[in-house]
Amino acid sequence: MRQSLARLPIFAAASVIFFYFLSVLWNAAVEREHPKWRLRSAKPLAGVAKPEPLDISTRAFLSGSLQKSASTALGRSLWVFPFSVRAKNQLLFSLFGVSGAPNIVIGRDGQLFERFYIDEFCSRGEAPDQNVIDRWADRVAADRATVHAMGKGFAYVISPSKASYAPQYFPKGAHCPALAARATDKLAPYRAALAARALPHVDAPALLETRRANYPLGFFPRGGTHWNLLGAALAAREATRLMATGEGAAPLGLYDFDWTLSHEAKGTDQDLLELLNLLWPDTHYPVAELAAKSAGPCARAPRLTALGGSFVRQIIVALASAPCPPEVDYWFSMRLDTDRMGLIRYHTQPGEIDKGERRDADPAQLRESLEIADAVLLEENEAQIGALSQVDNLWRALHPSAETVASDERGQPSAAVVRPAMRAYSP
């Protein structure tokens, strides 16, 4: 009896291993015909890219890459994989205050930053090529003039970077040459170029800086990389005032909003926290919630074509609470998993706050979207201003007969600094 009791830990461990082995066989057996029968984690990991197809070849086998890819794919397919990653990340976070996600930085007071934005901010200082800035500003001005000539409203928005907005929350001892040299004012030459062309725009970094003391919370959430809805709503309000047409009409109306303070983060207010993949993420911190101001019924929902990066999403959500919310055709410029630039397109119905319907993002269809729109919103983030493709995409759609641009302008980034796709885990 005593000998049997002594062996119980061995029997228990063997039972766990045997059950684990059976679960792997079960998942492999039902994967193709009955995928819903698979054993899986109740909380899958966020931000984990699908593994690449196996390269089954002699060269891959001899180099060991096939074995590595196969073991990675097998490991990720196991139902305990998400729990094990979350447990490891929670241990790193709770005991050492570090991130288990290589692209996320934990700053002071638990503020989370996307590493790209800190790297971009801290490498500022070198003066940009004035010819590049002039070409960029000329195209923004040409976009605005052509849209106005079509009888539509137009607004150009520069969105802020969290690193630029809150460098005081960088990790202790962070090496930041630009901050040490006081050379962080990247936008000065871009602002000068827009002013030289008398081009009205929404300078959200400057706007939020002047309004910072007016509110009991900041404009970036502790666990997010994007501005919160309060910051986006302030910019959206200015944008709708810039969208007046030549006849003085306001295609989206004059947007305004009410807001309340909440302490439960959701959606993009906790996008980086979600990517940390913790067992017990703390989502209790100040965030803003918007409420629509009352208004009469609309004759019809206005149509907005929006081109920009990920910061446009919060503007769309803010406009969903407008007295007459628009129908939005959103052309999203981003860096894809394949490390090339691409367009993703979403169509949201009036008042919709989710991503909406995914549509074909063929640039040839952008002209059609512009022709039926009542207004156009063009956005660039300060961290990548002039470096992505939205300005050129709009220019080419508005000037289809223009001379073909150089190869590095064909939907590709025009500067070296580009934001990589966010990853939560890398094997």
Image (cartoon, rainbow, N blue to C red):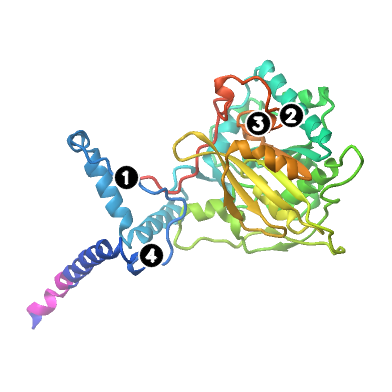
Mark 4 crowd level (few <14, some 14–19, many ≥20, 10 Å Cα): few
Crowdedness near tag 1: few (<14), some (14–19) or many (≥20) residues, C-alpha within 10 Å = few
Q: Tell me the amino acid under the disc marked 4.
A: Ser
Q: Is residue 338 left or right of residue 389?
A: left
Residue at the disc numbered 3: 385
State which tag comes first along the sequence, 4 or 3.
4
Measure how far apart labels 2 and 3 are at the Cα level: 12 Å
Q: Amino acid at mark 3?
A: Ile
Picture coordinates of residue 292 (x, y %)? 79, 62
Q: Secondary structure at mark 2?
A: helix
Q: In the rendered image of this protein, does residue 24 appear above or below residue 154?
A: below
Nearer the camera: disc 2 or disc 4? 2
Q: Amino acid at mark 1?
A: Pro
What residue sits 33% from the left and 62% below the top?
A: 80
Which residue is labeled 1 in the image?
Answer: 53
Magenta stretch: includes residue 110: no
Label 1 or label 3, whichever comes before in sequence order: 1
- Residue highlighted by disc 2: 140
Residue 49 on image: x %, y %:
42, 48
Q: Nearer the viewer, mark 2 or mark 3?
A: 2
Query: Circle 2: is it few (<14), some (14-19), or many (20+) Cα within 10 Å?
Result: many
Q: State the SS at label 4.
A: loop
Residue type highlighted by circle 2: Val
Instruction: Name the side, left or right, on which 37 lies relative to 64.
Output: right
Residue at mark 4: 41
Picture quadrant where residue 414 is located: top right
Secondary structure at numbered mark 3:
loop
Whole-percent x, y for residue 179 in the image = 63, 30
Give the residues in magenta.
Answer: 3-11
**Which secondary structure lies at badge 1?**
loop
Sooner in the amino-acid sequence: mark 2 or mark 3: 2
